[in-house]
Image (tube, helix red, strand yellow):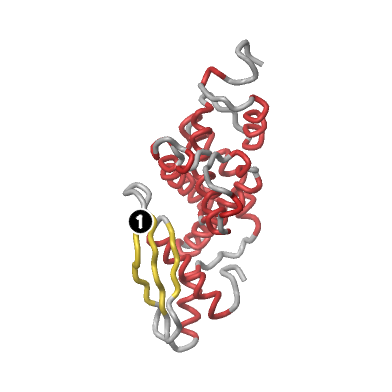
Amino acid sequence: MTENGPYRRDVGVTEPVSSQANLETKINYTFKNFNLLKQALTHSSAASHRRLSNERLEFLGDRVLGLIVADMLLTEFPNEDEGALGYRFAALVRRESLEQVADQLGFETHIKREIDPAEMSDRQRSSLLANACEAVIAAIYLDGGLASADAFIRCHWMQLLKQDLTPPKDAKTRLQEYAQGQGWNLPVYEITGQSGPDHAPEFTIEVTVHNHPPVQGGGRSKRAAETHAAEALYLQLTGKSENG
């Protein structure tokens, strides 16, 4: 306890020390500037200005994660070609992997938001957790440098990597191979919507194949939206998930 009460006033936050310490213990990193972690766990709905939310940190964290995961894969699989490494990379940095790490670390109870959890869809919750995880990576990087972010990522993503040592195929590849196996033309992707700010756009993409109704997917990049659309259509056609 400080002389001003049970809060860390030195960095201007008002979260109880016990809660802060618990969160830092979970991520195995102690912040010099806890405001960075506070911002990483602040959804835009609870921020007085979007720049004070975790959106900009998500942007940075995505790039830091990609760099470290790529380095991990080159080290762990020295005999694999770029194609196989690309499949692994896509699986490790996708939304579901980020959500899994965030779930394991209990981020949801620490996220500041003005959204009723009961009104959130599964996909909205998944995105909330994944985005917060990327932002936390950025916060660690800004506070402690690349070595600290590297340690955090390797600790949690190495576990994901070891879960399945078979190079996974991404949803677009699975859908394409399925269509070819049926003697159909290749899937066609079309952008049907774009929203959000310039630094964090959200794309909606529609995919069609053969005579089946089109299916839409969304994501923060065209590639991510295409992947989600392909995964949904593949599931409709085969009854199998991307990893099924």
Give the residue drawn at x 66%, y 47%.
104
Q: Position of residue 9 (x, y in %)?
A: 55, 18
Direction from residue 239 to residue 70 in the image, left or right: left
Direction from residue 51 to residue 181 in the image, left or right: right
Residue in the foreground of this view, choosing between 234 and 169: 234
Residue farthest to the top, as pictured: 3
Give the residue drawn at x 57%, y 80%.
238
Q: Which residue is mark 1?
A: 195
Residue in the foreground of this view, choosing between 227 and 173: 227
Count of numbered circles in the view: 1
Query: The C terminus lies in which quarter of the figure?
Result: bottom right
Residue farthest to the bottom, as pictured: 183
- Amino acid type, residue under disc 1 in the picture: Ser
How packed mark 1 is, by other alpha carbons closer than 10 Å (few <14, some 14-19, many 20 or more), is few
Image height check: is 91 above or below 75? below
- Whether residue 79 is visible here, answered yes or no, is no
Q: Position of residue 7 (x, y in %)?
A: 61, 20
Direction from residue 211 to residue 78 in the image, left or right: right
Q: Position of residue 41 (x, y in %)?
A: 53, 39
At numbered mark 1, what does the secondary structure look like: helix, strand or loop?
Answer: strand
Image height check: is 98 above or below 2? below
